[in-house]
Amino acid sequence: MDRNPSPPSSEAEEEEGGGDAVGNTVYSKHWLFSILTRLIEVISPEKTEPTVSPEGIQTELDEEMENDICKVWDMSMDEDVALFLQEFNAPDIFMGVFAKSKCPRLTEICVGILGNMACFQDICMSISKDENLGQVLLQRLCDSDSPTLLETSRLLLTCLSQPEVANVWVERIRENPSVYDCVCFIMSSSTNVLLKFLHFVCVVELLVKVGEVVDKLFDLDEELMLNWIKNGTCRSVGPSVDDSPEELPDFKIVPCILEAAKQVRSDNPEGLDVYMHILQLLTTVDEGIQAIVQAPDGGKETWSLLYDLVCHELCQPDDPPIIVQEQKTVLASILSVLSAMFASQTEQEYTKMRKNMPLIGSLIRILQYMEGCGKRSVDNSKESEQEETGRADLNEEDFHLKILKDICCELLSNMLQELTKENTLEGLHQGHLNEQTCSCAFQNLLPLYFASVESFLEVLREADQTLADNLEKRFPSLKVHA
């Protein structure tokens, strides 16, 4: 990469009969060609201007060049323009920029243009199969410039979302240990001293995009997820920018995920959803559950964050029942992780029922809200009986709500079985348990979780015989087995 990239072929200017327009657009081939040529000149050491560093490389873009290259960035969303750029070696020119440029803005724009070009399948396949370009792009994850990190993450997510090339990137990332360190660095940077390497203005947006990349990687490849779970040894990472850290700390995946989730929770609900789903994916393997519950704090930080989200932020008493429709995926992820932790760490202090009566109340409220949404779905389906699309959307809604209900019921049944008389009295006193809430719980838990309901009813008789009798009258199957 010491040599300057070759300029695009002059055939672009010599074409006859095709006119100057790029494909079916109004964009000029000659103008695009001139920008690509000027881009090479920007990183050529022979050029000397006030914005040139002592080494002879520009550190800042002049306003005219920045405006023009940004126009190319916008234009590259058009497939004809993207194909033109591909045909005239733009990726090779960008490789030269990445190797030689000391201008963060220029690097950001060039990665952004590649990201737009990668939206088109054939170009994405060409970019992805270029091993040198692939390695250079992964090195961008070690950049200290947050806009460049953001564009790099967008490009990676675009490629990972293309089934034809996703495995190429998964394998490439698996073989690059520095990717793990750089991703953890970004996720954990929001609340510690590493933040000095990032511009705070786009930290949340960057965290969301990096989270989407990790979520996609874990969803695509369990082996890579297991490797990252087991990872944590300190490695030397070759920085691409002078002020990048030369050696990164001993990162563990779970604390990094938690730090990122804390940062995005109040500013970006979609980002919170992403990070909760990453945690849920971890619990699909034993090693992931152990990574959570065998942390130095025994999983207390994870439980506390998820508990706080369910009990104090999501699906609250003053929210309309329809809110569960909006929050169903993030709730399902959170409750799935809580359920896995509760099942594996019943001896931990944070899972003791005396500390978790509000959580039982929140679980029942979620079930109550889902009943309201279920009635609404039935009404809507009657109104759209002749609309196939409407029915498909409703079926998808019902599917996600069913997942949430199943997870919610499993956790609730396990928690009810652990209740003592003292816990139950406290729940009655705090208002988490009453005839209405218990009826809702029984309605959803029976008959699948009969043993759990029966066990709770026995404890309830000791705490409030009248309430237990009333519930038996409403659910005769319980009385038969009493």
Image: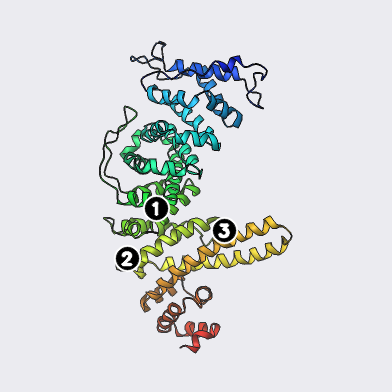
Query: Is residue 333 in view?
Result: yes
Left/right of residue 415 with respect to residue 164 in the rendered view: left
- Quick check: 459 above or below 394? below
| Circle nearer the N terminus (2, 3) | 3
The local crowd at label 1, few if under 14, some if 14 to 19, many if 20 or more residues have their Cα within 10 Å, is some
- CA gap between label 1 and label 3 equals 29 Å
Counting residues from the start of the chain, the first of labels 1 and 3 encountered is 1
Question: What element does badge 2 sit on?
Answer: loop
Near mark 3 (Cα within 10 A), the count class, few <14, some 14-19 or many ≥20, is: some
Q: Given the image, on which type of amino acid does mark 2 rest?
A: Gln
Question: What residue would you read off at disc 3?
Answer: 325
Q: Give the residue drawn at x 25%, y 45%.
A: 233
Front label number (1 vs 3): 1
Label 3: state its secondary structure.
helix
Q: How far apart are marks 2 and 3 (CA)?
A: 30 Å
Disc 2 + disc 1, Cβ < 8 Å: no
Residue in the picture at 31% in, 29% down: 243
- Nearer to us in this view, 40 or 435: 40
Q: Mark 2 = which residue?
A: 345
Residue 382 lies, in percent from the top left, at 71, 64
What residue do we see at 46% from left, 76% from top? 449
- Specify the label residue 222 is tagged with: 1
Question: Quick check: 194 above or below 64?
Answer: below
Left or right, residue 155 beside residue 397? left
